[in-house]
Image (cartoon, helix red, strand yellow):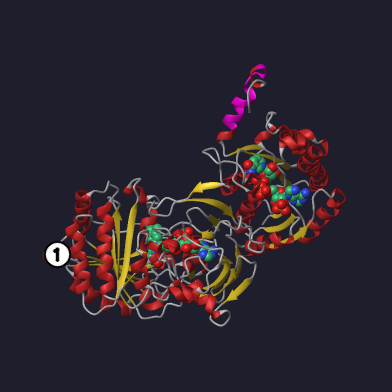
Amino acid sequence: MRKMLIIGATSAIAQATAKLFAQQGDALFLVGRDADKLEAIAADLKVRGAAKVVYITLDLNEFAQHADLIEQAYTRLEGLDTVLIAHGVLDNQITGQQDYAKAEQTLRTNFLSVVSLLTLIANRLEKQHYGCIAVISSVAGDRGRQSNYIYGSAKGALSIFLQGLRNRLHSANVCVLTIKPGFVDTPMTVDFKKGLLWAKPETIAQGIYRAIQKRKNTVYLPWFWWFIMFIIRNIPEFIFKRMKL
Amino acid sequence: MHNTYYSWGNFPPASQQIYPLRWRNKQLALPEPSLTVLPFGLGRSYGDVCLNDGGALLLTRELNRFIHFDNDNGLLRCEAGVSLAEILALGVPQGWFLPVTPGTQFVTVGGAIANDVHGKNHHCAGTFGRHVVQFELLRSDGERLLCSPTSNEQYYAATIGGLGLTGLITWAEIQLKRIYHRAMQMEAIKFANLEEFFEVSAQSDQYYDYTMAWVDCNSSGTELGRGIFFRGNHVKEEEIPKQWQLPLLNRLPPGLRTMPIHLPNFALNRWTVAAFNSFYYKRQKSKNINQLVDYEPFFYPLDAILEWKRLYGKRGFLQYQFVVPYTDHRVITEILQTIAQSGLSSFLAVLKTFGDLVSPGILSFPRPGVTLALDFPIKGAHTFELLERLDNMVSEAQGVVYPCKDARLSAHHFQIYYPQWHELAKYLDPRFSSSFWRRVTAK
Ligand SMILES: Cc1cc2nc3c(=O)[nH]c(=O)nc-3n(C[C@H](O)[C@H](O)[C@H](O)COP(=O)(O)OP(=O)(O)OC[C@H]3O[C@@H](n4cnc5c(N)ncnc54)[C@H](O)[C@@H]3O)c2cc1C
Ligand SMILES: NC(=O)c1ccc[n+]([C@@H]2O[C@H](COP(=O)([O-])OP(=O)(O)OC[C@H]3O[C@@H](n4cnc5c(N)ncnc54)[C@H](OP(=O)(O)O)[C@@H]3O)[C@@H](O)[C@H]2O)c1
């Protein structure tokens, strides 16, 4: 039985993933900022077979509360071996371009809050010498594009942070998984026109579940995004800068 | 966002705004007041009861959380967008089955209530609505009504079979049924004509929880009304073969999955349908097949070919299901004759007797009698004329047509079939409407 902490548990991708772990009878500690949503999710996970479901509400931009959050997870679950971090915001790129305060907000939520959380979590898992940390980054972090480079740079920084952390924790027997989804049909993307490349959160969840089981390093989800990003990363900059992406 | 959503028959097309719902305990986000809304589950209704052309659809499929499961008593509370497949996945391994299920498991609980659906066990279990202990109805003004046979009874009766027009069902509590294994004891019996059908049916309804028949609607003369009768029960505790007993409920013994008869995948025109029908009928050489099958092929043979409706092509198809009081089989015979003569033959014709358990909804379709369901590929005006003719025959015989399968019923016939629609109208939510409702209540 896993003892799992899910941060950003109300995210569509996190919900779908939590269902899979609940079905295995794992114990889950959920963190989100909306009690109504968490209540609905927790009840569902219990029916699906979770050994235990506890939740607390917290705006994750309140960094000062992070230590307490991790402490509570340890106490309530009587230990901790798996962590999924899923929260994030996709703010309007144009607004961020015009107003640094907005851009900073994106960076705080998508990057800095995760760094704060991971600092606490990594230190504890490193000491206990086992565990798995899975974090949702994005394909948007693989290369900067004019249409969403603020969000992209937060995710890109996050991916690099995770790379370093993986390197550090390898000797402590703790795995660090970087999850890079492509387009996913969730509340974050309601206003986007959906096409062939779009995936359901359930599909992404399956991929996350398997990657955690297999202690993978980085996964593109669905898999074909590996291929797409390979091409995108390899377009020479003198061409790329002229493209409308 | 504007979007084209189709119902199962691919007809009629409708364009509407889309509002995905995600949280049962949040306020309902509604479009501007000039637009009406309609809940949309899995779109397994054939016609337009789940469409709202020019308005908005409230997509309920993300309301798919369980709320509580009392495993000792089989009482399940879940959000209205949970599918019957999801309930089976949860319940069957624990020994609980749906009290009533339609011929596909890919429908939502909300959809099953709003059409008050029936299954092969209508003669002993009645409609789905009878097993709905209570539900919450969210109205467009934000009011939440807890509905049960003893609380807000009028809204309970109006919403069951209420075609999504009384408000949004956010969650429901359902009484599941005890089973001992996922296997079914099933029997298939050939019958040569309608008389034989009624005989077998009368014998079977007493001893079998599930009965229905497939009828060949291409044969005429003395072969008119020939077909295959299916009947079955969940295996009883003492009937479970030894080798299946150990890993319990959810293990599929090898070979259990296959149905004795498969549906072929060829294009549908008059000749292939005729060929198919006689193939289907002749394939079964002996008079009787008796065997154990898994519940999935037993209840959901069509789900195995997920997109079987594509067989009908882009033009779409219509389904026609009616029930007529059973006095003799004259009406059914005449209708089958009319269809055979038209040459607009249908792929599947399903015949079943309904029992006399009362449907709880004001507008529920099932009532005592014989029901027949047929598919018609749309072949222009001919098809519509034929169905209009059938309406004349059905209404004359004091029967009714099933709204959930309909895309073309005239206001005239609807109002003959369902004079109680005025009663339902009292409980409609002022912001809710559907393409179907506007059509059948037009002056
Ligand atoms: C292969 C196949 C076999 C079938 N066999 C049978 C059968 O044996 N017996 C039978 O009775 N039917 C049968 N049906 C029809 C099917 O059971 C019904 O159409 C069912 O209601 C579909 O559910 P849905 O979730 O797809 O709802 P939809 O088709 O999306 O919607 C149906 C109605 O429910 C309303 N609705 C949906 N959710 C809510 C909600 N949360 N609150 C309020 N209203 C809501 C909609 O507004 C609409 O009026 C069959 C259909 C198929 C495709
Ligand atoms: N959707 C995509 O196409 C896509 C692609 C690549 C990567 N991703 C990443 O996948 C992750 C999950 O997103 P999703 O697609 O599942 O979208 P989502 O359902 O909108 O999830 C985002 C979640 O983040 C939470 N959140 C945001 N700010 C928060 C804060 N300050 N405190 C607490 N919670 C906060 C939100 O909480 P509330 O519910 O309270 O609002 C919401 O649950 C995100 O990291 C996202 O960047 C998504």
Residue B396 visible in image: yes
The kind of residue on which mark 1 rests is Glu
Q: Is residue B27 above or below residue B123?
A: above
Q: Is residue A174 above or below residue B85?
A: above
> Residue at the spot x=23%, y=55% of the render?
B344
Instruction: Give how far across and how far down residue B75 sits, in percent.
Output: 55, 74
- For disc 1, the chain is B
Specify whether B45 is left or right of A139: left
Find out whether residue B338 is within the magenta segment. Answer: no
**Disc 1 crowd, CA 10 A, few/some/many (<14, 14-19, 20+):** some
Instruction: Give how far across and how far down residue B176 sits, in percent.
Output: 50, 73
Q: Secondary structure at mark 1?
A: helix
Front residue of this view, candidates B367 and A53:
B367
> Residue at the spot x=78%, y=34% of the render?
A98
Q: Which residues are magenta?
A: A226-238
Q: Is residue B243 above or below residue B328?
A: above
Find out whether residue A228 is within the magenta segment. Answer: yes
Specify whether A33 is left or right of B86: right
Residue B105 visible in image: no
Q: How many marks?
A: 1
The residue that disc 1 covers is B223
Dominant SS type (magenta):
helix
Front residue of this view, candidates B45 and B401:
B401
